[in-house]
Amino acid sequence: MNEKFIKSLYKTVVTDGIKAYQDLLENTDCRNATDRYWISILELYGQLSSEEKEKMLKFAELIIIDTISSVMGIFDGSSTLSGGALEFDIKINGIDTANELQDAFLEYIEEITT
């Protein structure tokens, strides 16, 4: 069950997320942006070569993967939450995920990148 969840999570957050960011970066006119950080990123992205744009998107993908891994570790109890010890009881279709989500996610990343 965790495998199906992990694959769906990866597709939704990583694959579809990177595509959405790439679409926004490629198709947003800087003059239409209002957030100062987004404007800065759009300006930077517009100055990059195709190869540099690809590297920037790969870096964004790495950040997303690392963030998911950290959150999964907190949820499954294999990592601690800064500032307090909260207990989570995450179940997928009634099946406990204790100490499994982060490992399953990282194993899937290793599987698809090797």
Image (cartoon, grey):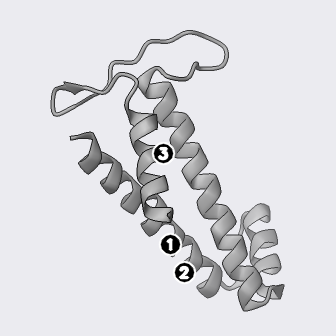
Q: Tell me the crowding category of disc 1: few under 14, some 14 to 19, or many 20 or more residues within 10 angstroms, Cα based.
A: few
Q: Which mark is residue 106?
A: 3
Mark 1 = which residue? 20
Above or below — where is 63 with respect to 81?
Answer: below
Depth check, front residue: 47 or 32: 47
Residue shown at 80% from the left, 85% from the top: 48
The amino acid at mark 1 is Ala
Badge 3 or badge 2: first in the primary sequence? 2
Q: What's the CA distance linking mark 3 and mark 1? A: 23 Å
Q: What's the CA distance linking mark 3 and mark 2? A: 27 Å
The amino acid at mark 3 is Leu
Q: Which mark is residue 97?
A: none
Residue shown at 24% from the left, 50% from the top: 4
Above or below — where is 92 with respect to 28?
Answer: above
Depth check, front residue: 113 or 66: 113
Element on which disc 2 rests = helix
Asked if disc 3 and disc 1 are in contact, CB closer than 8 Å, the reply is no
Residue farthest toward the top in the current orientation of the protein: 85
